[in-house]
Image (spheres, rainbow, N blue to C red):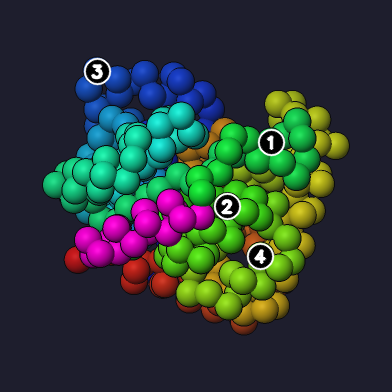
Amino acid sequence: MFGECHAHIIMDGKNYRKAVELHAEQVQDDVIRRHLKAYQDVGVSFVRDGGDSYGVSRRAKELAPEYGIDYRTPVFAIHKEGHYGSIVGRSFRNLREYYQRVLEAREEGADFIKIMTTGLLDFDNHGKVTGTPLEAAEVREMAHIAHEEGFAVMSHTNGVYGVQAALEAGVDSVEHGNYMDEETVLMLAQSRTVWVPTLVTVRNLMGCGRYEDRVIRPIMDHAAANLRLAYEKGAMIAPGSDAGAYQVPHGKGIEDELSAFLQILGDTAEVRTRLENGEYEIYRRFCRN
């Protein structure tokens, strides 16, 4: 299996707002088909989407079999009101509303639940994450509710506090995981959680002009060091590029992500096998049927 373990088919890798506007009135099949063809062309047979607010990933799941692709989606991500996540999903104010969102996701055909527990890495303040992370107790309840309803949990999470809270909550995958420290990486290695680091969301910004390379380089180096440590300690890791993010095209994004893994860890049979095992874990946990 060659899978893309983190994608957003609603995005185009160029301009988020324009990409979303295309689907604002009606989901555009021709755009979805173009992205699915890009995956087909590079031999991808499994895609796990991170969700959106317009039903685009849900439609992609319907069209994907025509391209030989098993497409899985949470339909929409779930974020707490006032916190990061509105670009990919629906909000909740309290755990009662969160439970309703989980039920809505099930009714709309979700394969798993995606939660947003922190903001993004802050390019203006190295080592910092935007916004305020959700409290660990709340994350634990969110994961518990989703698991009780029979869903695996994909968690958008960055920073030491956020990742540790997600790991303690027993989420099935941590997406991004920027700025972990050594203690957190060791916790990851001792858990059942799969880490999908989405390396190229940062690496592909080198030389593009959006940020100075001197800003990008230390973020890249920190992520590479964490990946090497996670691999050394036996953590489960899987390649997912966050395809659709700026400078991360559908299809090529996962090729870039795999190349980044092999550059950092070495292109050996053992490394490739470990990555394949990570992909299999994602596939096994996040496909409900």
Q: What kind of residue is marked 1?
A: Asp
Relative to the observer, which residue lies in front, 38 or 72? Answer: 72
Q: What kind of residue is marked 4?
A: Thr
Task: Measure the alpha-carbon separation of dots 4 and 3.
Answer: 43 Å
Residue 162, disc:
2
Q: What kind of residue is marked 2?
A: Gly
Residue that mark 4 sits on: 184
Residue that mark 1 sits on: 122
Question: Helix or strand or loop: what does disc 3 sit on?
Answer: loop
Task: Measure the alpha-carbon separation of dots 1 and 2.
Answer: 14 Å
Q: Is residue 193 left or right of residue 88?
A: right
Q: Residue at x 30, y 24 (%)?
A: 23
Question: Helix or strand or loop: what does disc 4 sit on?
Answer: helix
Q: What kind of residue is marked 3?
A: Glu
Between marks 1 and 3 in the image, the one whose residue lies nearer the viewer: 1
Q: Is residue 146 above or below residue 125?
A: below
Rendered location of residue 137, percent (x, y): 46, 55
